[in-house]
Image (spheres, rainbow, N blue to C red):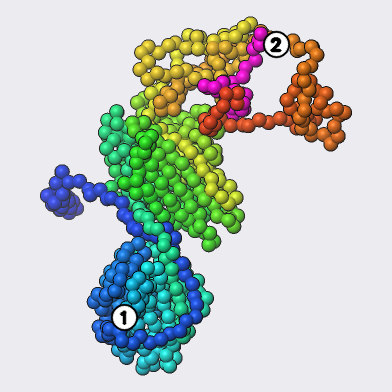
Amino acid sequence: MKENLQKKVSCFVAILTLLLLIFPAGFKAQIESQSSVLITTTPYAFSASSGNFTYLTGGTGVSSIQVDSGYSGALPIGFSFKFGCQDYTQVYASSHGTLSFEGGNPGFSNSIEPPSSRKFLAPFWADLDGRQGTASYATSGTAPNRIFTMEWRNWKRYGSSVPNRNISFQVKLYEGTNVIQYIYKQELASSTSPKVTIGLFYGTHNNNKRWLDNASSSPTASSVQSSDLNRPATNQVYTFTRDGNSCTTLCMGRTTLNNSGGTKETDGLRIIMTGAGNIQVVKNGTGQIFGPDDRLFYGTSKPYSAPALYTAHGLVLGIGGTQYTTGTLKASFGFTDGGRLTIVSNTCQSDTGPDTNGIERNKIRLKATKNGLDYFLNVYYYYRSPETFMTVDYEVEIPAGNTELVKVAHGLDTALDGGDFGPGFVTGQAPYYTVGVQKKGSYEAFQYVSGTPWSGYYSDFQHKMNNGIGDDLTFKNAINPSATTDNAMGISLNFGKDSGTYNSISKVIFNCHAEVAPVLTRTSVPCGSGSINLNSFVVPLNPNPHNLVPMWRDSTGAEVANPTSVSKAGVYTVSYRDTVNSCDSPPSTFTITGECVITTCTKPASTATPTAFTKMGMSGYSSLQKDWPAKIPNGFIALESGFNGLVITRTVPGKITEPVAGMLIYDTSKNCFSLYNGTSWKCIEKSCND
C-alpha cells in the first residue's frame, strides 16, 4: 500500500514538473475580446405571388454542379449586389439548391442551422442530384436595372426512384433594389417528399435569417428553420426585399468599464462583465466579488460563468413558475428551470464611453421565451471614474398577452477586499434601503435609487442565498450581523403582470469612509421648553478628511429635516453620511424624554373687509351651497369634500428635474411637505410667521 502511494506521488510530481515547463510562471491566460456581427436593423420583408416561369436561354453553363454533390467556382453577377450588410459581385452555386456569396456552401444537410459564417440563398435546399439536369446563369438588361439569373433545370432529390425532371427553379437578383426572387416549375416527375428548406441566411441572429414554414402560395417567413417542405407549385414566386434597411454592429461578450482603473485608491473601480452580465469588480488591485482572482477572461465564450463555481452569483428572471438564469443564483425550489437567458447583445466595447459627463455604460440585453411570448431583461451598468460605486438599471419588457408575474433577482457573493467574512446590515427607510456587508476597511452594498421598489433584500451566508429566494423568487429581508458570516448580498424585484416596460435603479457601492458610529456626549435629554440642537451632542470629528456629516433619523426612519431645532420627544438615531459614496456609518441612539412645550405661534387671522372673492372651485358634493365658491373671500381656488382629502404630488426632490421657486411636493423620503425656495428643497415647519 505504501509503495503504491509513493508511485502515485512520484507520478504527480512528474506531471506537475511537466506542466511548469509547458506553462512557466509568467504565463497569462488570453483575455477574450467581444464577438461582433453585422445585422440589418429589421429582417428582409417577404411576399408570395404568382409569376411566369421561363427557361433561361443563352446563359453560361455551370457543369461543375451537374453532379451528385458539387460546387461551382466564382460566378460573376455583373453588378454590385448588396446581400445583408455587404456588397458582392460574385456568387457560388451548389448542386444542393443553394447560392452562396462567400463560398463555403452549406452542404446537403438542411436539418441543422448552418454556422454563422455562411451567407447564402436557399431557393430549394436539400440533398439534391444534378446528374440529369442542367445549370446555367446570365445577366440581362442594362445598368442600372440589370437582373442576374441562376437556374437549376430538371433537378431531383438524391436517391429518388424517379429518374429525372422533378423540379426546375431560378434565383433572380435585381440591381439597385437588391431584391431577391425565387421562381419554380414542377416538372413531369412526381414529388417524393424532398424535405426541402427555402429561405435565406447570413448569420445566426434572428434578423439575419428568413425561413419559410411551408411551400404553399402563402407561407410565413421567420427565423425558425424548417427542413420538411415540399416542392412549390409551377409559377410560384417568393420575393425577399431588403427595403433599404440600415445595418448595425451587434456585439456580445466580455466588456469592461474603466479598463485601466482599479489598480490603486485614486483610479476607481474596474468593472468586468461577461456577455450574460455576471461581474467582477476590481478595487486597489483586488477583486471584490468571490473569487477575487478571477477576471472573467473567458466572458465571451463562457458568458454564463461566475467568478467562482460554488457560489451564488448572477441574475434570475422569473416568469410565473419558470426561472431563467445567467449564473449560479437560482431558486432552489418552487420553480421549473427554463434554462439560460438568451444573450441578445451587449454594448460594443468601443461604444461604452466615457461620454461628456465621464460616464461609461454597458447595456446587456437578455431574452426568455415562454408560451410563444418573448420577455426581455435589459441590464444597464453605469460607471464614472474614480467613483467607488456603479449604478445598475434593471429594465424588463413584458409582452402583450402575458398573464404571469414577472420578477428579477440579482445576487453577488462578496469578497470584501479579498476577505470573505463580514457582518450584514440594512439601513434606511422603505423604499430607500441600503443593504450589504461592512467591516473595518471594507464595504459592499446595494442601495435603492428609484423606480420599482425592491420586493426583498438579503445579506447572509452565501450558501443559503438560493434557498433565501424562497419559492416565490423574493428575498425575505434576511440580515446576519455576525462578523463570521461568509456573506453574499442580493435584491429582488416584482414587476407585476401588466404588459409594458418597467425599471428599477440601484447603486452597488464598494467603498464607504463612514465606518464608525458617531460618539455622543450624552445619550438622552429631557425635552422641556424650546427646541433641541441634536448636533450639539455629537463629538466633532477631528480630523475629518472625508467631510462626513451627521445624519439624524426619527423613530420611523425618516430623516430629520432640521436637527438643530427639534421639539418632539422620541428615539432618534445618528449616523455619519459619506456624501461622495452615498453611504452611512453604523448608527448611535439618542433619546428625547418627557413632553415638549410648543413655543411656535401663529398670527391672528384678518377680520378686515375682503378685497376679492373666489371665482373657481371644486367640490365633492352633489349639491353646492348657495353662492359657492364666490362667498369665500380672498381665495384663488376653493376645494371642499366631506369624504376625501387633498393629496399633492408624492415624490422625492431628486425626481424633479426642473424645479421652480414656489413648487410644493410631499417628500416621501422625509415625510414632510417640501417647498423649493429657488435654490434648494426645504421641509415646511411650524414656526412664528411674524
Nearer the observer, 536 or 65? 65
Image spot of residue 249 (x, y percent) = 35, 55
Label 1 or label 2, whichever comes before in sequence order: 1
Give the class, few, some or many, for how many residues have Cα within 10 Å of label 1's Cα (few <14, many ≥20): many
Per the rendering, the mark at residue 138 is 1
Which residue does the numbered mark 2 point to in the structure image? 602
Question: Could you say whether the residue bearing mark 1 is in a helix, strand or loop?
Answer: strand
Q: Name the amino acid type tagged 1.
A: Ala
Taking the magenta stretch, the answer to whether it contains residue 312 is no
Name which residue lies at 50% across and 9% down. Answer: 536
Specify the quadrant of the image occupied by residue 116.
bottom left
Name which residue lies at 44% across and 73% down. Answer: 239
Q: Would residue 261 be found to the left or right of residue 686 on screen?
A: left
Image spot of residue 617 (x, y percent) = 77, 30
Above or below for 37 versus 108: above
Q: Name the amino acid type tagged 2.
A: Thr
Q: Would residue 517 be found to the left or right of residue 57 on screen?
A: right
Above or below for 624 versus 251: above
Name which residue lies at 84% across and 36% down. Answer: 622
Name which residue lies at 61% across and 28% down. Answer: 665
Image spot of residue 456 (x, y percent) = 53, 39
> Which residues fall within the magenta stretch?
664-690
Above or below for 420 versus 188: above
